[in-house]
Amino acid sequence: MTSKHLELTQVGIDFPTPKGPFTALCDVNLKIEKGEFVSLIGHSGCGKSTVLNIVAGLHQATTGGVILDNAEVKEPGPERAVVFQNHSLLPWLSVYKNVELAVKQTLRGKSKKEIRDWVMHNLELVHMTHATDKLPSEISGGMKQRVGIARALAMEPKVLLMDEPFGALDALTRAHLQDSLMDIHADLGNTVIMITHDVDEAVLLSDRIVMMTNGPAATVGEILDIKLPRPRNRLALADNPEYNHYRHEVLTFLYEKQKKIEPVGSKKSTKSSVAGKPDSKSDAA
Amino acid sequence: MSKSASLVTSIGQLKEGNPLKTLMSNTQALLLPVIGLLLFLAVWNGVARNIDTSLGQFPGPSQVWTQTLTLIDEHNAQREKADAFYVRQDERNAKRVAQDPEYQPKIRPFTGAPTFFDQIWTSLYTVMVGFLIASLIAVPVGILCGLSKSAYTAINPLIQLFKPVSPLAWLPLVTMVVSALYVSDDPVFSKSFVTSAFTVSLCCLWPTLINTAVGVSNIDKDLVNVSRVLRLKPLTHLTKIVLPASIPMIFTGLRLSLGIGWMVLIAAEMLAQNPGLGKFVWDEFQNGSSESLARIMVAVLTIGAIGFILDRLMLMLQRLVSWDKSSVLR
């Protein structure tokens, strides 16, 4: 038996409610190679975040379990760093101190200079060295998310977990950060699991896209291998038939196979309009 | 071209208009409280003239002002007496030592009646000690309640039970317990001081405790998750995450507590005849001279002013401690 880097086996989770347990996830199986970039995509409420939180150790699976490098995941830890959707920087610490807090936890016993160098190195990766002494409230949303990523990278995680990292950002900032993330991933080769709502983001960044069925008792629906060569360029890919084929696959899964019957809020409408844009572009071309 | 020129002039007009507006709002901010104060003084004066009590006419602003000056004079006179007393004592002791080098000089404190300002000082000192004791207990217990649901569930009934208790109900118990347990030949603090301070503490505990618990339990869940992912040690978690996040709520509690403590102290001093502003008010009332009401009124205004100043001091302390300098504090 070949042992994988990260393995989810028969993962399921029940949440207690007054009406009895609610099964949010059921039989989730997933094997992830070292250095792989995997996206989780699915409708809101299908349990993507729950999967991520189980891998992070923030939730405990009711059935099944997660194994990372032959060790079971039981509690949260810096080797599975999380980038939260709303950055979650400590508002009372400067950019530098926020990253330093993570560095001090993981490089315990190192000299002051080593700690300082490592903090600055990670801030450099996300191009944030110019604002080290600013408080989070003094920098823009995109910058905050950069610092959040720097903080996670500074922990030297085996797996980087990202929960809709760019969901709260405007389209231009998002594209910029996606490019940064691709560069960083090419450099460091971390294993990444990213949750996203954005079909383009998923196809552009991922090696594999894991599409989840709707809850309750959500599970892995289909897995799509993205065999686009790296480095990828968003402009060049816009007219690439292969790229559009992948997009189409994901859209078909989301809007035909796993169509949401209940009325969906504004989130879906904005998403479909974003998804529709490149279509019209390719039509014009 | 002409469009941009007109834009420039209109911006110029705006800029000219703005200082005028700020001046207006500044004068308003200064003028309105003064108008309110003058109106209050006028109404007070008018009403006071029409109230006749067994101790004479109710004091108006002018009588109160006269008594304020009298109280200051009395205080200065007492200070001079005390100074003179100590000079005499020193001279006497020096003489005795000159006659007999073996003699151990006796130094006795001045025993004149405390003045109004002595009483203010006593009250301030007592409330601060009582408040400090309460805060030292309430903040840690509040943090514990905020962090642990079990601790909160265990302690909550007690909080709800004791929170509404009036200080005056505690007072006899505290007095008896203090006189039973606080026995020493050479006490550092007087019994009356200990009694007053503990009564204040008992009433100061609850607002701080409750607000701290609420503040700590409402910390953003993502920040707690960050701490878990980083595997912060409990102490680091407390200092880096819990305390900074709950500082505003802790201070809301502290300010409420201090305000309650100040009110409680005056009542306790009146009832227990412990030295302080409350005793001053009660003594003047029992004294029953024609000036008593005016002197009590001076005390009332002083109590109000000190309460206000204490609150402002807490606000300044909060500004100093809080990380969020931009937040509006009121």
Image: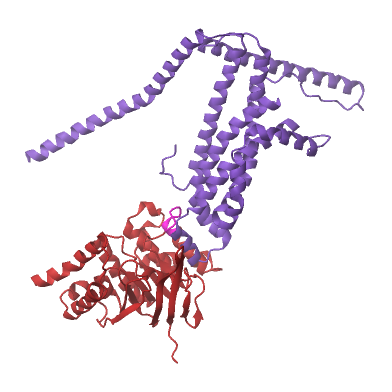
Chain colours: A red, B purple
In the rendered structure, the answer to whether residue A283 lies left or right of residue B19 reads left
The residue range painted magenta reads A89-96
So how many labels did they put on this image?
0
Write the residue at 33% across / 74% down.
Answer: A40
In the rendered structure, the answer to whether residue B110 lies left or right of residue A38 reads right
Report if residue A125 is visible in the image. yes
- The rendered magenta stretch, by its main secondary structure, is classed as loop
Write the residue at 60% across / 55% down.
Answer: B151
Indicate the quadrant where residue B121 lies. Answer: top right
In the rendered structure, the answer to whether residue B292 lies left or right of residue A42 reads right
Residue B136 image point, x, y percent = 63, 45
Q: Is residue A92 magenta?
A: yes
Q: Residue furthest front?
A: A19
Write the residue at 23% across / 65% down.
Answer: A271
Residue B325 image point, x, y percent = 43, 44
Residue A43 image point, x, y percent = 30, 69
Report if residue B190 is visible in the image. no
